Amino acid sequence: MLDKSNTSSTVWADTAYRSKANEDFMEKQGFVSRVHRKKPHLKPMSRHIQRSNAGKSVIRSRVEHVFADQKSQTGLFIRTVGISRATMRIGLANIVYNMRRFLFLERLNASA
């Protein structure tokens, strides 16, 4: 879901989301595509595309690790009745992640 009210107009995604229709839509809507490029069928991927994908992977992995951590906390499902309780559960999971990350960075800084 692309939202113009988002603070960033850059779209980061995997190769599964790269299509001519998606690229045209993003260009018309003013989004900047940072979607991975696919390897040509039965051909090696060129060096500059490999480097481009590697740079994009660094950014995407930082974000995806946060979601993986939340997924491991909730087990994949949020088992609550009602949107407000689910929102609260997700908010608490975010607080727990932020506190654990803060403590990790504090310990890392103290040992340096």
Image: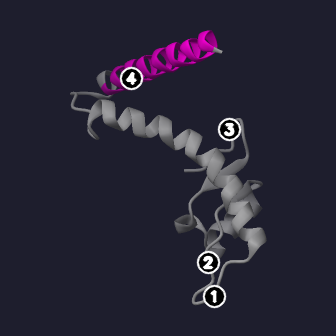
Name the secondary structure under disc 4: helix
Q: Disc 4 vs disc 3: which is toward the camera?
A: 4
| Residue 39 circle label | 2
Residue 29's place in the image compared with 80, above or below, is below
> Mark 4 — residue?
93
Q: Nearer the viewer, residue 91 or 47?
A: 47
Q: Earlier in the sequence, mark 3 or mark 1?
A: 3
Q: Position of residue 106 (x, y in %)?
A: 57, 12
Q: Nearer the viewer, mark 2 or mark 4?
A: 2
75 to the left or right of 14: left
Between tags 3 and 2, which lies in front? 2
Span colored in magenta = 86-111
Residue density around tag 2, few if under 14, some if 14–19, many if 20 or more, within 10 Å? few
Residue type at mark 2 is Lys
Q: Residue furthest front?
A: 111
The residue to which callout 1 is attached is: 43
Q: Secondary structure at mark 2?
A: loop
Extreme residue toward the top, this view = 110
Residue underneath mark 3: 5
Residue type, numbered disc 3: Ser
Where residue 22 sits: x, y (%)? 63, 67
Name the one closer to the observer, 48 or 85.
48
Residue depicted at 67% across the width and 58% down the height: 54
What's the residue at 73%, 61% (across, down)?
52
Looking at the image, residue 61 sits to the left or right of residue 59; the answer is left
